[in-house]
Amino acid sequence: MKSPSLAKIDVQAILDDFRNLNPKDVGAWPLAPRIAVLLGLFVLILFFGWWFWWSEQLETLAQRQQDELKLKEQFVDKKTQAVNRDLYVQQLSEIDRSFGALLKQLPNKSEVESLLVEINQSGMGRGLQFELFKPGAEVVKDFYAELPINVRLTGNYHDFGAFAGDIGKLSRIVTLNNISIVPNQQAKDGTLVMDAVTKTFRYLDEEELAAKRKAEQAAKGGKK
């Protein structure tokens, strides 16, 4: 049984209205064709509007939304930096103090000789015999120079360990590198021979830093 709403719709009549349309007299068209044409025009207007104008606007909107997200992230980053500025300043001050303390542990040119004496005395104070104590050529770094010293000592293992501990306790920075310990072939008393490279460091004075910068600039100019 058909519902009352469907019973009122005469499908055949509507189809006849579309078949008998007169293109030259649009004003005399029945209601159904006129509604269909209006809906079709509306859909076409929406399509062409989207194709020629709205699509570009939507792309622009999407780009603006991305820009907005980036600006929000930048704002949050800058706000975080502003909030933590005092902390950053405090950390920078602590770094400067730490760097200054480390710099004080580097001797200047006039103090290197006394430091070499301290190294020598540290070994002799532990009963070690120096068979070799030969400073090498300085290696210049960014703001300091590295002085390697080739050493060879004879003694027992316990004294070598004590000597290394004394080196670590010096007021200046001194390191032991390339350590090699072997039995002493020239003695039968069970002593050992230790070969090592002792490195100490000194900071460059203003004249040396200026000369270094001048040499670097000259080298860059020569490469051009």
Image: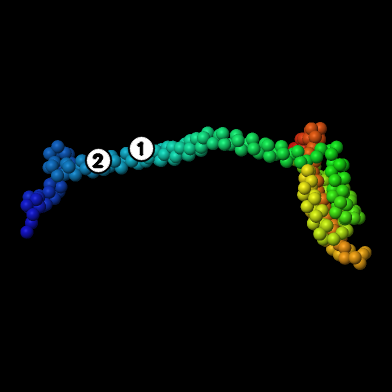
Quadrant in which the C terminus is drawn: top right
- Residue holding disc 1: 53
Reading the chain from its start, which is encountered first: label 2 or label 1? 2
Q: Residues within 10 Å of mark 2 (few under 14, many from 20)?
A: few
**What's the residue type where badge 2 is placed?**
Phe
Q: Position of residue 17 (x, y in %)?
A: 12, 47
Residue depicted at 17% across the width and 42% down the height: 35
Query: For residue 204, which numbered disc appears in the image?
Result: none
Residue depicted at 39% across the width and 38% down the height: 61
Left or right relative to 22: residue 156: right
Kindly give the residue lying farthest to the right in the view shown. 186
- Would you say residue 173 is visible in this rendering? yes
Q: Position of residue 13 (x, y in %)?
A: 10, 49
- Residue holding disc 2: 42
Q: Position of residue 30 (x, y in %)?
A: 12, 42
Quadrant in which the N terminus is drawn: bottom left
Residue depicted at 28% across the width and 39% down the height: 45
Q: How many marks?
A: 2
Residue depicted at 86% across the width and 42% down the height: 114
Query: Vertically, is 187 above or below 41?
Result: below
Mark-to-mark CA distance, 2 and 1 = 16 Å
Front position in the image: 91 or 75: 91
Task: Give the secondary structure at mark 1.
Answer: helix
Front position in the image: 79 or 95: 95
Task: Give the secondary structure at mark 2.
Answer: helix
**What's the residue type where badge 1 is placed?**
Trp
